[in-house]
Amino acid sequence: MKNKIKILMVLGNTRRGGTQAFIMNILRNIDRERFQIDFAINNDFEGGWGPDMRALGSEIYIFPVFKVYNWLSFQKWWESFLKENPYDIVHGHSTNSAGIYLRVAKQYGCRTIAHIHSTGYRGNVIERITKRIISKLTKKHAVYWFACSGNAAQLLYGKDYLSYPHYYEMPNAIDVKRFEYDEETRRKVRAELGIADDEYLCGHAGTFSIPKNHTFLLDVFTEIYKRNRNAKLLLIGEGVLKESIIAKAKGLGIYDRIIFRQNLPNVNEHLMAMDLFIFPSLFEGFGMVSLEAQATGLNVIQSDAVPKDTHLTECVEALSLSESPAKWAERALTTPRRDRKTMNQTISNTKYNLKHTISLITRLYEEMVKE
């Protein structure tokens, strides 16, 4: 058998977020007899995807966090690493520092990819400005430009992506079959969570961070609970803002109606257990969890800041964050229930079916090494 094509994916961490879920879908479904995919990360989170990556044959390397002031030492780390660990392709999902490590990768003969999954920069004003400036180096050193959507591409590449010959939209696709609604799974998970048949389970899955807007989510749920005393809320995820969200829940008097769960490997099953998904993000590159929720036939009420590309079924209701939490609650509770099994086939027929993405990325990886 000929040598495998060696790919190094660079990302911030192994947390069970949307970007990482997309990457894991690639790793699980690509032909691992033809491709060796390893990872360079800043942080291998406990409870994250690290063990799963290793179980699928990947190596994980920890690289230093880029802080601007450590530019030279950051660059030297990458020079030393790639000198000792040759790769055919460096696929950069961590775009804030990609302009540095992709330049080094080119020096060592690697094909280079920048891949953006967001439509906004995180951090305070100074951090966001700095990231925006540094990220401009990325398109100079990435030969291939990937993005989850046109809006995300605009952020990193500007309008140049519209005419760039090596730009590819790489939809945040899912393994649709894993999200096919199953009544028995719903009953099992609700029993594990202690949810009675007559209780109305709202939910959310995502990092406790500013863009996910958990503070507004709690306000919406408070209004739902006022109207439906059988309502409960399931929050799946971890993050730096979790303790502040717990404190707010206690202040609102709804803490005892909330179930907190750490990042889970079977979010698909928990989506089946829910009756409503609340997704009030301030911004999203795509909003993969909305797609996952729809694939289980779950009603989704989300902010209009989530890209319209996610509006794939009639399950989605989009509202402005300028609308009151009471308005959100009213709309959520008047959304009709549908046959949840039919929505999976709708998603399966779109470009967000993983099999299309696997075919595209396989072809591109093979084309790159032939150049």
Image (spheres, rainbow, N blue to C red):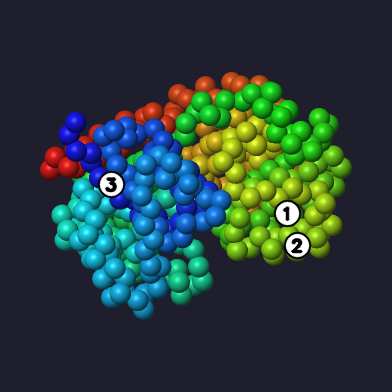
Q: Quick one: label 3, few (<14), some, or many (20+) residues within 10 Å?
A: many
Rendered location of residue 355, percent (x, y): 39, 28
Residue lying at 39% horizontally and 61% vertically, measured from the top left:
62
- Residue 151 versus residue 310 in the image, above or below: below
Res 153 visible: no
Spatial CA distance of label 2 from label 3 is: 43 Å
Spatial CA distance of label 1 from label 3 is: 41 Å
Q: Secondary structure at mark 3?
A: strand
Q: Tell me which label, 2 or 1, sits earlier in the chain.
A: 1
Residue lying at 30% horizontally and 50% vertically, measured from the top left:
8
- Residue 357 versus residue 91 in the image, above or below: above
Spatial CA distance of label 2 from label 1 is: 8 Å
Q: Amino acid at mark 1?
A: Leu
Q: For residue 218, which numbered disc appears in the image?
A: 1
Q: Quadrant of residue 219?
A: bottom right
Q: Secondary structure at mark 2?
A: helix
Single out the residue that lies furthest toward the bottom. Answer: 69
Rendered location of residue 236, percent (x, y): 64, 48
- Give the label, 2 or 3, closer to the camera: 3
**Circles 2, 1 touching at the beta carbon (< 8 Å):** yes
Question: Which residue bears the numbered disc 3?
Answer: 7
Residue lying at 59% horizontally and 48% vertically, measured from the top left:
263
Rendered location of residue 116, percent (x, y): 38, 52
Q: Tell me which label, 1 or 3, sits earlier in the chain.
A: 3
Rendered location of residue 49, percent (x, y): 49, 47
Q: For residue 248, which numbered disc appears in the image?
A: 2
Q: Amino acid at mark 3?
A: Ile
| Closer to us: 111 or 309 | 111
The answer to whether 288 appears left or right of 151 in the picture is right
